[in-house]
Image: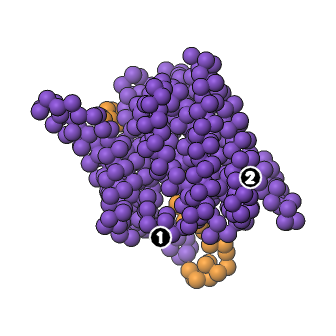
Chain colours: A orange, B purple
Amino acid sequence: MTQQVGSGSKREKPLMARFSLDAWALAFALLLSLLVWIGLIKHVPW
Amino acid sequence: MASSIAIRQSLPLGIFKRIAEILPGLLLLAAVGYAGKFLERSFAATGKAHHLTLPNIEYVLWAIVIGLLIANTTGVPAVFKPGLATYEFWLKSGIVLLGSRFLLGDVLKLGGVSLVLVAIEIAISLLFMTALGRAFGLKPKLTTLLAVGSSICGVSAIIATKGAIEADDEDSSFAIAAILALGAIALFIFPLVGRWLGMSDQAYGLWAGLGIDNTAEVTAAGALYSDAAAKVAVLAKTARNAMIGFVVLGYALHWARKEGTEGVGNKAAFLWAKFPKFVLGFLVISAVATAHVFSKDQLTSLANLSRWAFLLTFAGVGLRTNIAEMRKQGLRPFVVGALGEVAIAILTLGLVFGADKFLR
């Protein structure tokens, strides 16, 4: 059954490869910003 | 049904496998970066404790030097390679977060001036590098790759152009090796020249952003000068990166006409595909910060997150620089690149001094 799906339809790209590095970096940075804004990340020391 | 379950079960497994692959290299990046930070503090503390006047050596330099030492003595085992490759992810995330340290007005003003300078720099650099490549008898596509790499944004531009003009793998690895080697050299020379000329943070940042090829090296060269210079350098480089699509499109059309191939269909889609999306994130975060959505403490946290992301990047810059590998790539592309880089550095220095009055 699994074999049939593999040969019969287009094989899905892995999740990581579906988006560019830029898109992942953008999403990650925006997520961090959101977490800071809603207060889940409270203080980041340097 | 069974197949959909199989796919659903394999998805988290794939992610876990990927995390396991990148974890060793990521830990190495963090260890080298943090060692740089530790050495900066220890060096300063030693000087203070013994009443010695020691130079302030920034963590950026320590991290790069430690990385270079590891990469060129013991070498980096294969298990670390996937994680080391994430340095570019941290660089781009760091740039987006850096947007929180800019008011949108400043971005538009400095970015606008940068864009004008970038346009002049790109036009002259492309012409100069093309002439230089011809004079040295380099293959036309290798010359194109070197020209794009040194005028816009290093490795990303070379990879984007390689696909668009269907250049050989060999040509692109020559061009990438030359650009990386020259970027590593520029990283150390630019701060020295900047200090020697007594450049302001803003002028130096602009010069580094226009004159150095790779974004990681630009960020590091800026941070080696000062925090303020690093901000300006990244902004100028971001403006330069934004031009990548137009230049790659121009070359794709040129080579398609020359070789009688099909060329580019939908030009708008092509431009969008090549446009670096993190530039948009940088602008969004800057706009949100300008609208006072974040409190002062939150802005500090975002700025520090950006610094941590850059810390991993700087470690990656040293760790991926393999001098022996670069030597293998041959001398001619390197000489062409080096001559071009020196000319571009002088040209951009002149442009920056010319534009200085518009930035005050």
In the rendered structure, are the residues bearing label 1 and label 2 in contact, judged by CB atoms less than 8 Å apart?
no
Q: Earlier in the sequence, mark 1 or mark 2?
A: 1
Quadrant location of the N terminus of chain B in the rendered image? bottom right
**Horizontal side of residue B68 vs B202, given as left or right:** left
Q: In the image shown, does B310 or B189 lie closer to the viewer? A: B189
Q: Residue furthest front?
A: B135
Residue B277 position in % (x across, y down): 61, 44
Crowding at mark 1 (Cα within 10 Å: few <14, some 14-19, many 20+)? few
Residue B4 position in % (x across, y down): 55, 71
Image point (43%, 44%), residue name: B188
Crowding at mark 2 (Cα within 10 Å: few <14, some 14-19, many 20+)? some
* Visible residue check, residue B139: yes
Task: For marks 1 and 2, give the CA distance.
Answer: 53 Å
Mark 1 highlights which residue? B10
Mark 2 highlights which residue? B131
The verdict on a common chain for dots 1 and 2 is: yes
Q: Is residue A7 above or below residue B309?
A: below
Residue A14 position in % (x across, y down): 54, 66
Q: Secondary structure at mark 2?
A: helix
Foreground: disc 1 or disc 2: 2
Image point (47%, 51%), residue name: B184
> Of the residues shown, which amino acid type is indicated by label 2?
Ala
Q: Chain of mark 2?
A: B
- Residue B335: name its quadrant: bottom right
- Residue A39: name its quadrant: top left
